[in-house]
Structure formats: structure tokens, C-alpha cells
Amino acid sequence: MKYSKISTLSFLSFLLFFVSCSSDDSFEARITEGDYDEICVLGSEICQISEPSSFDIVNQDYFVIADEKYVSLYSTKGKQLRLIGNAGNARYEYNRPTLVRSCGDSVYVWSSMSLKFISYSLDGVPGAEYPYNSAVRDFDVSQDKIWIYTAGSRHKTVGRHHCDRLS
């Protein structure tokens, strides 16, 4: 059984990237080797995960990981609880889920091969699909909007996709 480690260091590195893009030069963050706290070791109770491509914190008890084939819900103790959605090319299925975000009790997946966002409940039940006609480098979700940092044909632009209902 293969295990992968996830840590606060990864989260802090991600946070440091956004802080470093700030125009306020008065803040300086330093991460040293002593700042590392291992949170858990990832289990593979349901399926073997490969190298994670994206993760997001759902709440203090759960986080989600995409590994370009599956999206998994984990407890902060490292137990793989369930798969979110299914891999494939049909409606509500993802093909190469490269980015994953959570908002409230929902998980949002960017399916890079089918160029669409898909929302799911934490139980893995699909909510809605949102096609998008460009590659996506990153995204975030808030209320009724998906904020998108594009790649490909709209390289280096930030936009938002208004949704009738995010679920």
C-alpha cells in the first residue's frame, strides 16, 4: 500500500505564493524546516492515488485531492473516505481532473480534457456542469461565481463565470 504525505508546508507554500504576489512589501514570510507539522499520511482504502495535482481544505475535518484520474475526499486523519464523482466522458464525469476546490458543502472539479467545471456534494452526487472554452490554470469559487485564471487561448487573464446556481 503506497502512502503519500500532505502537510501544512504544502499549504503554507501555496499561501506564500499568493502573498508574494502582493504589492505590499512590508510583509515578509519565512518558512523554515522547523515550521513543518505533518498532519497525516494518506491512505488508499478505496483506490490507489497517484501524484496529487491539486488539493483543497473543505473544513477542519476534511480535504479533497485530485490526482488527474480521480477526486478523493479524505479525513484529516488521512483516511480515504470516498471518491467524488466518476472518471469518464459522460455528463457529470471528469476526464483528467487537474484542479479541485471546495466551497461550503460542495466540491468543484476542473476537467481539463473535457473543458468543464463540475460541482458535486461531499457525498459525490453531481450538482451541475459549467462548460468553459479555454484551458484553465487555476480557479476559485465564491457564492454564484467561478473565478478563473485562464491559460491557452486566453493566457494570463482572470475572469469570472456567472452561474445561475452553484450547487
Image: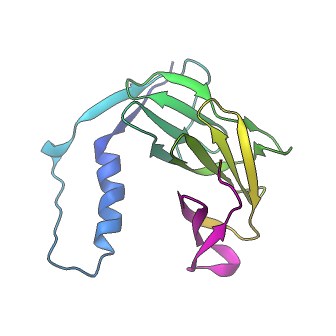
Task: Give yes or no for residue 5 being in the magenta stretch.
Answer: no
Identified at 35% across, 28% down, the residue is 40
Identified at 46% across, 46% down, the residue is 56
Q: Is residue 109 left or right of residue 73?
A: right
Q: Is residue 132 left or right of residue 109?
A: right
Pick out the residue farthest to the right: 90
Identified at 63% across, 45% down, the residue is 68
Relative to 131, is 127 above or below? above
Identified at 70% across, 48% down, the residue is 96
Relative to 11, is 79 above or below? above
> Hey, which quadrant is residue 152 in on the image?
bottom right
**Closer to the camera in the image, 3 or 9:** 9
Q: Position of residue 166 (x, y in %)?
A: 65, 53
Rendering colour mode: rainbow
Q: Position of residue 114 (x, y in %)?
A: 78, 56
Task: Give yes or no for residue 158 being in the magenta stretch.
Answer: yes
Query: How many marks on residues?
Result: 0
Relative to 32, is 154 above or below? below
**Closer to the camera in the image, 86 or 152:** 86
Range of residues picked out in magenta: 138-166
Relative to 150, is 163 above or below? above
Q: Is residue 98 left or right of residue 58?
A: right
Q: Position of residue 99 (x, y in %)?
A: 58, 52
Q: Position of residue 136 (x, y in %)?
A: 63, 66
**Closer to the camera in the image, 157 or 130:** 130
